[in-house]
Image (cartoon, rainbow, N blue to C red):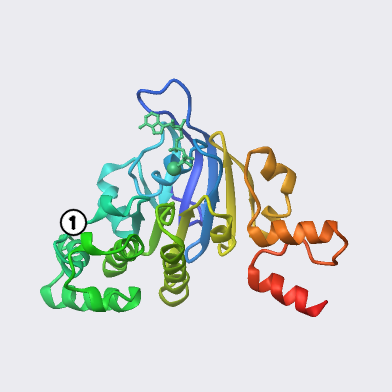
Amino acid sequence: MKTADCGYISFRDVVFRFSNGSANVLNGISFSIRRRSFTAIIGPNGSGKSTLVRHANGLLAPTAGEVWVDGMDTRISANIPDIRRRVGFVFQNPDNQLVGTTVEEDIAFGPENLGMQPSAIKESVEFALEVTGLTHLAGRPPHMLSGGQKQQLAIAGAVAMKTECLVLDEPTSMLGPAGKRSVMELLKKIKRDLDMTLLLVTHFMEEAVFADRILVIDDGRIVMDGTPQQVFKSRSLLSGIGLELPGPAELSGRLRDGGVPLPDPVLTVDELVECLCRL
Ligand SMILES: Nc1ncnc2c1ncn2[C@@H]1O[C@H](COP(=O)(O)OP(=O)(O)OP(=O)(O)O)[C@@H](O)[C@H]1O
Ligand SMILES: [Mg+2]
């Protein structure tokens, strides 16, 4: 019998072409992510990031190759409900994923669909409200939330369903600075406190630095796979595909060029302040 390898989510030689497309969007993607890991995916516009992550919970099936989630092959339609129970998805546009007339109802939607008992639903909803900091907004209609709160609500839905993994496709790209910060703080919290596996597509390098691992995608291929330290040291490869460094890495690079002895790379503002204060 065929089984998945040791990864929680495993892509094996995945090729994907849209039925109306003439070219492959994914050109042989292979990687595995471990349970409880935090992986970021970065890459230029149109490189295939959204197409790739939509394979991670069976929203898309490979044209060739295989994707396995917790030992289940996503090409087998009977596996899809179990896969979606494990892997939740948060989309870019917060308005596209709200279903309830109140925050509380919205969160309850997933557990209800799973057929949970009313008392268990209530408990799950209360837990998700507390984890995501939305308890004070439980009775509010979702359309009256800020963008950041709507994304917190989408994440609350997954927390209430006790999904093991959350895939987020540019969850902060439509948010202002405060919304971006609150969503990233929440992701760090659910990774730390709930042991969730995270797969985050982002255009913001300042967000990618929080991951354990970064996959860099270009033209449907993985062109780099490493820790944030390794990836953001590869300046020429990144700039060659139009990607920037996180602000602190860019600034510390210029200071280094000007003779200031700083490590390469410095990834966060806190790290940069600490290095400068030690000089
Ligand atoms: N439904 C579709 N039908 C046909 N082609 C598509 C479809 N969706 C995306 N594509 C094409 O597939 C390629 C990869 O798109 P994808 O959305 O995965 O890129 P992306 O890396 O997520 O880009 P962005 O950073 O802009 O979100 C692009 O060339 C895009 O035009
Ligand atoms: Mg995309």
State the residue at coordinates (76%, 79%): 277
Q: Amino acid at mark 1?
A: Val
In depth, the one of 249 and 16 nearer the eye is 249
In depth, the one of 136 and 238 nearer the eye is 136
Estimate the x, y position of residue 238 in percent, counting from the top left: 67, 45
- Identify residue for label 1: 99
Q: Is residue 122 left or right of residue 272?
A: left
Q: Is residue 230 above or below residue 1?
A: below
State the residue at coordinates (29%, 74%): 134
Query: For residue 159, which quarter of the picture?
Result: bottom left
Is the CB of mark 1 within 8 Å of ligand 2? no
State the residue at coordinates (77%, 61%): 264
Estimate the x, y position of residue 8 in percent, counting from the top left: 46, 57
Query: For residue 127, which quarter of the picture?
Result: bottom left
Whether residue 46 is visible to the viewer of this picture, yes or no, is yes
Farthest-out residue, right? 259
Whether residue 70 is visible to the viewer of this picture, yes or no, is no
Farthest-out residue, left? 118
Estimate the x, y position of residue 33 in percent, counting from the top left: 51, 56
Estimate the x, y position of residue 71 in percent, counting from the top left: 40, 54
Mark 1 burial class by Cα count in 10 Å: few <14, some 14-19, many 20+ = some
Q: Is residue 227 left or right of residue 64?
A: right
Q: Quadrant of the C terminus?
A: bottom right
**Ligand 2 lies in quarter:** top left
State the residue at coordinates (46%, 56%): 199
Q: Is residue 52 above or below residue 273?
A: above
